[in-house]
Amino acid sequence: MTIKFGPAGLGSVADAEKVLEQYKKLGFKICEIAFTYSAYIKDKKDAKRIGEKAKELGIELTIHAPYFINLNSSEKEKIEASKKRILKCCEIGEELGVKRVVFHPGYYGKTSREETYTNIKKQIKEILEHIKKNNWKIKISPETMGKINVFGSPEEISNLVKETGCDFCIDFAHILAREKKVDYEKIKKLFPQKEWHCHFSGIVYGEKGEKHHRTTEKKEWEELLKNLPKDKEISIVCESPTLIEDSVEGMKIYEKLK
C-alpha cells in the first residue's frame, strides 16, 4: 500500500507555486484545488505554469468542483448549468494536468432514490461523452456524501462507477456522518478498484448526518490508517479546518504504522 497525503487547498493563483514548494517540503504528494465556489484559475497560461510546477515537485493535482451542482434538479437549466461547471473544471484541469475532478452529484429532492439515481447516471454518461469527444484524459469522481437527504451513499457511488465507468471519491468522514459508523469491509467490496481517491477529516454529525468538518483527532487517523486495504494506491486529501497540520499528523502516524 502506498498513501499520498495532502490538503484540500492551493490558495491564490499568484502564490500557487510558492505554496506547492512549501507542500513539497512538508512531504505532501497530493493537493486538491478547491474550485468549490468558482473555477478561479481562468488563464490557460497560469494553469499550465502551476501544473508544470506540481509535476516537477512530484505533487499530484486534483480539483474539487463547485458546490452548486445538482444533476437531479427539477429545472433543466440547473442541470445544464451543473454539467457546465463540471466540464469547465475538466477543461482547466486538462491544462493543469489534473487527474480527476471530484464533485457532489445532487439531491433527492422530491424524486425517489431510484429515479434520482437514474437521472444522475444519465447526466454523468453525457459528461463522460463530452470528455471523450474532447480527448481529455481527466476522470470525474462523484463523492460519497454526508447528509442522509443528499444523493451519495457508498452503494450509489459504487453503482455509478460500475454502470457509467466514472471514477469515485470515498469521503470517510461523510460515510461516518451518514451511516454513524464506517464498515471498512463493505467499502472494500463496493470499491474493488486498485486506486482509491479519498477525503478525510474530523466531522460533527447528528441524526440527519453531517453538520461540519472539524480538526482530525489522532485516534481518528489511527483507525482509518489501520483499516485501509493494504493492496491499493491510496490518496488522502484532508478537508479539516486545520488541513495542513492534520495532513502532516496523518503522514507521521502512517510512518509509525508502516
Image (spheres, rainbow, N blue to C red):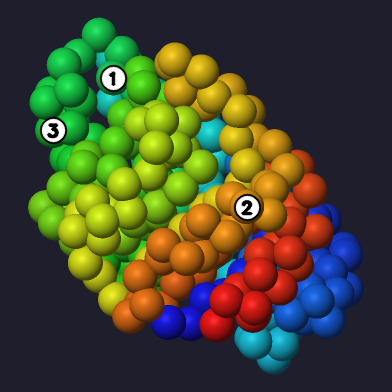
The label shown at residue 43 is: none
Residue behind mark 2 = 219
CB of mark 2 within 8 Å of CB of mark 1? Answer: no
Is residue 29 found left or right of 186 in the rendered image? right
| Residue 195, position as x, y percentages in the image | 35, 73
Q: Amino acid at mark 1?
A: Tyr
Task: Tell me the quadrant of the picture where the N terminus can be found.
Answer: bottom left
| Residue 41, position as x, y percentages in the image | 69, 57
* Residue 7, image quadrant: bottom right
Indicate whether 51 appears above or below 100: below
Residue behind mark 3 = 118
Q: Residue furthest top?
A: 110
| Residue drawn where x is 63% and y is 42% of the image | 202
- In the depicted view, which residue is nearer to us: 240 or 204? 204
Looking at the image, how many numbered discs can be counted on the residues? 3
Circle nearer the viewer, 3 or 2? 2
| Residue drawn where x is 69% and y is 48% of the image | 217
Q: Earlier in the sequence, mark 3 or mark 1?
A: 1
Indicate whether 105 appears above or below 103: above
Q: Earlier in the sequence, mark 2 or mark 1?
A: 1
Q: Is residue 248 visible?
A: yes
- In the depicted view, which residue is nearer to us: 178 or 104? 178
Bin the neighbour count of mark 2 within 10 Å (Cα to Cα): few under 14, some 14-19, many 20 and up. Answer: few
Residue behind mark 1 = 108
CB of mark 3 within 8 Å of CB of mark 1? Answer: no
Is residue 161 found left or right of 39 in the rendered image? left
The alpha-carbon separation of the residues under discs 3 and 1 comes to 11 Å
Is residue 6 found left or right of 23 in the rendered image? left
